[in-house]
Image (spheres, rainbow, N blue to C red):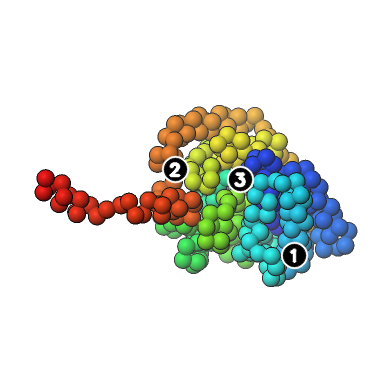
Amino acid sequence: MKVTFSIIKADVGGWPGHANVHPALMEIAKNKLQEAKEGGLLIDFHVTHCGDDLELIMTHTKGVDNEEIHSLAWETFKEATEKAKELKLYGAGQDLLSDAFSGNIKGMGPGVAEMEFTERKAEPVIAFMMDKTEPGAFNMPIFKTFADPFNTAGLVIDPSMHNGFVFEIWDIQEHKIVKMSTPEEMYDILALIGAKSRFVIKRVYPKEGGKLPADEPVAVVSTEKLYQIAGKYIGKDDPVAAVRCQSGLPALGEVLNPYAFPHLVSGWMRGSHNGPIMPVGVKNAICTRFDGPPRVVALGFQLSEGKLVGPVDLFDDPGFDRARQIALEVADYMRAHGPFEPHRLPMEDMEYTTLPGVLEKLKGRFVDAKEKENVIAHF
């Protein structure tokens, strides 16, 4: 049968600061989704968090962008926001950019990653959730999963994967979309997605003629960017992703292995710094040091007629201890730069932070350099 796997997240209030999600907000979400399950809207659900983001993982048969599902998530976040305000949690409702739901939650603040597909005989799905970073943070690991033979042995030795995959890439500044194929367009894809603040991988599809339907995605990433929606800095983007694996797709370990390298991502403190993404179990997805370092969690499920068998907390594993240690060493190195680039983001990425306010305050104190040189030369 066809099932829809939806991850919808929002920061509706940090506890304390930007560190965690208060248990009362998690309980509200569980109760709301349980009511929807009992009413037949959902097949199953799981509520969790990554840092200060409330994460709703849901299965249903309504398809992507469904108004009922998105309305459920919106009302859940609104109710949680009211509790957050009552508890005076930090930034209560900061990801909710409107007071009125308009039929679709996209563009209203929360992040969304959904895909509809035909459930296979065995259907493993991984829900990835990041905090203190941007959608482009998934570019490197998703590329390595589906296109790098040094990471994914199946690209070389599994005939069903040998032809590669199709990447749907979004230009989130120009609001344009392109589909490109691997391995034949690999270098062109890298030319784009290496600029991770602009070009982001949105979906990955199988190719025609393979074991899986070519019109059903095998990976999807949330691409909402809060600063572009709101026009000013109000929070980090904190993306989520869903990835299917095994049986004609990368194996579970091939999907997870890219996160053993804590690559540099943008976000961290005030959304204004580069730092390493650290893979952690949910219990350690609490962003404290300089509001970080940025975190990623991975929950693994088997789907059975849409029911979520799991989760398994996949990064709660000593196999990722070294990645965490490297991330901490890189965090030390980056923090030692203080307010200097490349720890702080370049100026073009600071436009929607509080930095423009500083520049505006100093605006009248800048003088033309040539005029200044002429005055000095005169004396």
Q: What residue is rendered at 60% in x and 55% in y?
A: 221
Residue 96 appears in which quarter of the rendering?
bottom right
The answer to whether 210 is drawn above or below residue 319 in the figure is: below
What is the residue that sits farthest to the right in this orientation? Answer: 38
The answer to whether 262 is drawn above or below residue 224 in the figure is: above
User: Which dot marks residue 156?
Assistant: none
Name the residue that disc number 1 marks: 71
Which type of secondary structure does the marked residue at label 2 adopt?
A: loop
Viewer-closest of 336 and 186 = 336
- The disc labelled 3 sits on which kind of residue? Asp
Label 2 and label 3: CA atoms lie apart by 18 Å
Viewer-closest of 143 and 342 = 342
Q: Nearer the viewer, mark 2 or mark 3?
A: 2
Which type of secondary structure does the marked residue at label 1 adopt?
A: helix
Q: Residue 249 at x, y = what percent?
A: 62, 51
Which type of secondary structure does the marked residue at label 3 adopt?
A: strand
Q: Nearer the viewer, mark 2 or mark 1?
A: 2
Q: What residue is rendered at 69% in x and 65% in y?
A: 99
Name the residue that disc number 2 marks: 344
Name the residue that disc number 3 marks: 131
What is the residue that sits farthest to the bottom in this orientation? Answer: 102
- The disc labelled 1 sits on which kind of residue? Ser
- Location of the C terminus (image quadrant): top left
Viewer-closest of 164 and 104 = 104
Q: Earlier in the sequence, mark 2 or mark 1?
A: 1
What is the residue that sits farthest to the left in this orientation? Answer: 378
Q: Earlier in the sequence, mark 3 or mark 1?
A: 1
Q: Residue 59 at x, y = what percent?
A: 76, 57
- The disc labelled 2 sits on which kind of residue? Arg
Q: Residue 17 at x, y = what percent?
A: 64, 42
Residue 314 appears in which quarter of the rendering?
top right
